[in-house]
Image (tube, rainbow, N blue to C red):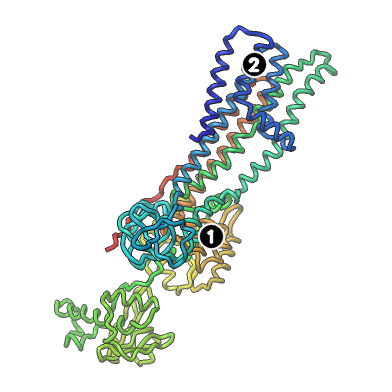
Amino acid sequence: MDKRQKKTLMRILAAAAMLVVIRFMPVHGLVRFLLYLVPYLTVGYDILKKAWKGLIRGRALDENFLMAVATIGAMALAIYEDGDYTEAIAVMLFYQVGEWFQNYAIGKSRKNITELMDIRPDYANIEKDGQLEKVDPDDVEVGSIIVVQPGEKVPIDGIVVEGSSTLDTSALTGESVPRSVGPDQEINSGCINQTGVLKIRTTKEFGDSTASKILDMVENASSKKARTENFITRFARVYTPAVVYSAVALAVLPPVIRMAFMGIAPEWGQWIYRALTFLVISCPCALVISIPLSFFAGIGGASKAGVLVKGSSYMENLAQVKTVVFDKTGTLTKGVFQVQAVHDVNDHDLLCKGCDKCDHADPECAEADRRLRDRILECAALAECASSHPISRSLQKAYGKVIDRDRVSDIEEISGAGVKAVVDGVPVAAGNAKLMKQLGLEVHGCHSTGTLVYVAIDGKYMGHILISDVVKSTSEEAIRLLKKEGVRRTVMLTGDKESVAAAVAEKLGLTEHHSELLPGDKVEKVEELIAQERGKEKVAFTGDGVNDAPVLARADVGIAMGALGSDAAIEAADIVLMDDDPRQIAQAISISRKTLRIVYENIYFAIGVKLLCLVLGAFGIVGMWAAIFADVGVMVIAVLNALRTLRVKRLFQPEKKPERI
């Protein structure tokens, strides 16, 4: 609770205490009025001040004006009838209670989000003359070496040059599982260093780092209002003048009709009282406050789960998604080539004489088989040692030993086919079927799906190596969770060949897939899917945020997957998932739908109760006390309901990441 809230609470308590004391004092007339005026001004002077400022600035028709007119009118009626001033003061008192509760709830929501996003560091450590000096992160240039000690936040994005540690990335990803980091690995600002001392070479300026971009995005999220919020704004502009004019009509027309046409007493006091009650009931606080608060809290709850939403309009669109389109590489798969298997040719004349017709059940034969496969992988890795192609890197990684370049000579890269080299004095060729055909060798196919690297040793085809992108362990569950959330279509778009795409789609249970697509083809496919949607249904596209930027921008909802630190992702996408877990897509949809459900609950509840009380107040069935209880009660219930969006139900348990050795 801040100082302003404490001050308001003290005013409310003081006014309530004075009201109780004066209630039992035996005073009448002017003295009675002056005594009651003290608690009235104590609790309501700020409302009267705001109403007056609005009046002189031409913006009178707001809730402050309604409360001022209603309570001053009630005081005037009490003077006229020498009645009870308690009702007028109680109206202002309970209204201030509602306002205080609303401000407290919003403050609590903001505090939760501020604590959650408290990732902007206050300083960076620069080593000078053997001593650490704290400097402003804004003053650190790209390429500088900074030191991050255990317990400190990483201030700027960079690459670790010395040290190893574990990082708490929960403020960025929403996951509590620590992540290990070591030399030559990228590190993002906003993480908390937990164990070892790290020296980091900065790769970005402070303002362009991950933490700064995330905070800017969350802070600016309120600028992109949802259609529901805009509706409430337009509704209030029409609604407030309408109820003011209706209240004036209620105060004037019935007495005039009674007096002029019915020949009976006009009863001005009764109808003015009803009009004032009508004004109190009409105050649209619950709607005006609870709807933006619902979206604000929903964005905060999503941020806590590692889902950054750029604005409430995107959250509203996400709640209406029925088709989710995926890029394959980096989204459903890990985006890295990996050796899956080494298959030899069942011809072991060089290593195992006379066993070409056996079943290889003999231990000596099985050992020869293993040695041959090892030899195939070794020769391929050595022949490819001069290449930086992802397939070459995967072969070297699978080999797992230090590459001795002295064993390799006469390396010749053949464009679009592969490579030839001499390994340990023996000619080796590694590449695709086109290369083997050039060498006049017949190759064997493979029953598994993936990229095949055929290997020939000393002019003889020896076998092939199967390399493929690895499907993420969480992708299958992600599709299942999406279907559970009501997503009807899950579509995969990829530039990979049909056989690979079909295998991934079948494994994951996708409803459809499209292969061998260029970036422009992906945009066209998404446009086709958008054209096929019905009514308010939306299409979301999920990609890595770099190559897929055009599609992210074209889809109804662009979701950047695993975009931690990716500038292109943050710029192009509407929703940014700070981890590379595809299950977060279903989590984001679940949060958005809960938020929209609460928003509409508040709209229907607030308008329904308002209309009922307005009718009852116009007919004199409820008085001022009931009116203020209805107004404050509806606002309190709506605000409490809105704060439910801060609570996020996790749909899955985070995957435990292996420790770095």
Residue at (81% x, 13% y) in the render: 264
Residue at (28% x, 78% y) in the render: 343
Say which residue label 2 marks.
Answer: 85
Q: Earlier in the sequence, mark 2 or mark 1?
A: 2
Residue at (60% x, 52% y) in the render: 536
Can residue 480 be seen here? The reply is no
* Closest to the observer, 449 or 242: 242
* Closest to the observer, 424 or 539: 424
Residue 226 falls left or right of residue 570 = right
Residue at (68% x, 34% y) in the render: 62
> Hey, what amino acid is under mark 1?
Ala
Where disc 1 sits, the SS reads loop
Q: Can you tell which mark lies on residue 573?
A: 1
**Percent position (x, y) of residue 159?**
39, 66
Q: How many marks?
A: 2
* Closest to the observer, 479 or 569: 569
Can residue 496 be seen here? The reply is yes
